[in-house]
Image (cartoon, helix red, strand yellow):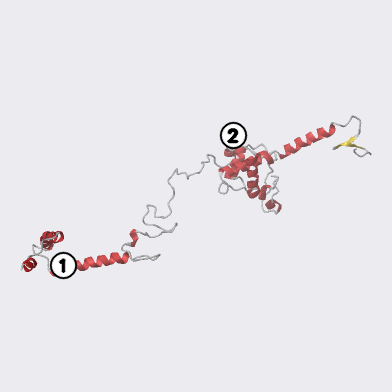
Amino acid sequence: MSFLAASCRPPLPTRHSWRATRVRPLFSVAGARAMALRGRAGKPATPRRSTLTALILAALAGAVIAGCGASGNDRAREYFPDMARGPAYKAFAPNAATRSGLTLQAPVAGTIARGHQVFHFGPGEEEAARAGRELTNPLPVSAGTIEDGRGLYQTYCLICHGANGKGDGPLVVAGKIPTPPAYTSVRVAPFPPGRIFHVVTMGTQKMPSYAALLTPGERWKVVAYVSRTLQTQDETRETRGESASSARRAPSREGSGTLPGFPNETKGRAAP
């Protein structure tokens, strides 16, 4: 009997069942309030409206799942794709989104590109002479600088000016361009490094500008090679010739009858 009495007793409320008994009425009250708020003109919402709301929520959930369902390189379905990928415009195509109506915009006045060195000299002889007075080579004129300048000269300048700067490059020999003055000529030999840099940068007469092909540092290397090697080659040869002639005339004696240019040889007798 005691067993039957124990089995007929209602079970003691567990932790979870206690929560269920306490929370279920709260959901009922909240649902009733929500239904009352959704009604129009004080009328509660009908089951049909609740069904429509459920369908809309299901559709949105399906759209989210479909949008996240892409794998690999496949693009998922998008709503408002222009928000992520705007329309592409070509550089010279008209563009209604800009004030000028053009896609490619000019830089703001006074803009200087990063790393660009402003050249405060214009074209012409007067500006070239001023550059010769005001500009100096910022690079140390070392053997490495001259060697680099020689390589650049052979790449960009030799075709017109020739290997020794005599104005006898391959294009001149072929008659394609007029003969440029030699670096040892009366006109070009006195040019200071700054003026040569101006010519390379701005161009002169038939010679175009090389500013787009050579950086300022590379142009100064070419200037160092030209001013230290090609402009002074005749003076160097004359100096070497005078030194050699002095050395050769030193052992000769007066009245030995030496030949011009051959101080160690006499008429009718071979040099010892």
Residue 40 x %, y %: 11, 63
Q: Which residue carries the number 1 mark?
A: 50
Image-quadrant location for residue 202: top right
Labelled disc at residue 133? 2
Q: Quadrant of the N terminus?
A: bottom left
Q: How many marks?
A: 2
Image marks 2 and 1: residues in contact by CB distance under 8 Å:
no
Residue 245 x %, y %: 81, 35
Image-quadrant location for residue 182: top right
Q: Which residue is more in the foreground, 126 or 48?
A: 48
Question: Callout 1 environment at 10 Å: few (<14), some (14 to 19), or many (20+)?
Answer: few
Residue 118 x %, y %: 51, 41
Q: Amino acid type of disc 2?
A: Arg
Q: Is residue 249 above or below residue 213?
A: above
* Residue drawn at 26 percent across, 65 percent down: 61
Q: Amino acid type of disc 1?
A: Ser
Q: Which residue is more in the foreground, 119 or 17?
A: 17
